[in-house]
Amino acid sequence: MPKEKNIVALAKSFAAIHKTCFGNPGIKFSSSFILSLIENPNVKFIEQEQKGFCLARLSNGEAEIITMAIKPEFQQKGIGYSILIKTIQLIEKTSCKTIFLEVASDNVAGIRLYSKAGFNKCGIRKDYYQISNGKKADAIIMKKTLVE
Ligand SMILES: CC(C)(COP(=O)(O)OP(=O)(O)OC[C@H]1O[C@@H](n2cnc3c(N)ncnc32)[C@H](O)[C@@H]1OP(=O)(O)O)[C@@H](O)C(=O)NCCC(=O)NCCS
């Protein structure tokens, strides 16, 4: 398959996985949006085929976990942790010294996963996520320092 088709198929697959994880429209990632991300040379990803992925953006000494998602039927089997650790190892090979991310304050699984991987809470964005019925959720900002 030509490389361009591969990347389009990958973006579709990531979008489909993301959709199974995040039902609400406020944080849905379309395949065209994901394609625009993975075409960006500053955006890196780790995937486990058809099961899950993590997207990270590198910029000027800092990295950001953009999103990650594991298909519900493959969750709680260690795949998310494995993908996250591989993403951190990839970032460690760059000049980035810190990794930031945002996670919804009610996302217990996400917060526990990131804490297990060495991220600490460092801030909060009130009403950051639009969720169903016009309700909003806070974003917890988490940070991991790679080099002291
Ligand atoms: C959060 C998510 C990526 C975790 O992936 P996963 O493959 O299920 O996670 P793992 O099996 O590797 O578990 C790693 C750790 O995460 C935490 N965790 C995972 N699922 C959990 C759950 N349902 N409840 C509480 N903690 C959970 C635990 O600390 C776990 O470590 P432990 O098994 O030693 O207790 C997955 O649940 C997911 O895709 N959720 C929807 C999308 C999302 O919330 N993404 C993250 C925010 S952008």
Image (cartoon, rainbow, N blue to C red):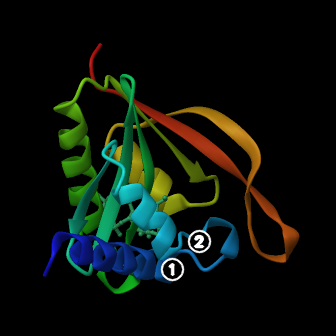
Tell whether 7 sits left or right of 135.
left
Q: Is disc 2 placed on a helix, strand or loop?
A: loop
In the figure, 133 relative to 44: above or below? below
**Amino acid of disc 1:** Lys
The image quadrant where one finds the C terminus is: top left
Quarter of the image where one finds residue 27: bottom right
Of the numbered discs in the image, which one, if any, rests on residue 116?
none
**Residue at image x 43%, y 82%?**
16
Q: What residue would you read off at disc 2? A: 28
Q: Residue 138: in sight, yes or no?
A: yes
Residue 129 position within the rendered picture, expressed as x and y whole percent measured from the top left: 71, 57
The image quadrant where one finds the N terminus is: bottom left
Identify the residue at the far bottom of this view: 73
In the figure, 111 relative to 51: above or below? above
Residue 100 position within the rendered picture, expressed as x and y whole percent measured from the top left: 46, 36
**Residue at image x 34%, y 42%?**
42
Q: Is disc 1 placed on a helix, strand or loop?
A: helix
**Residue at image x 31%, y 26%?**
96
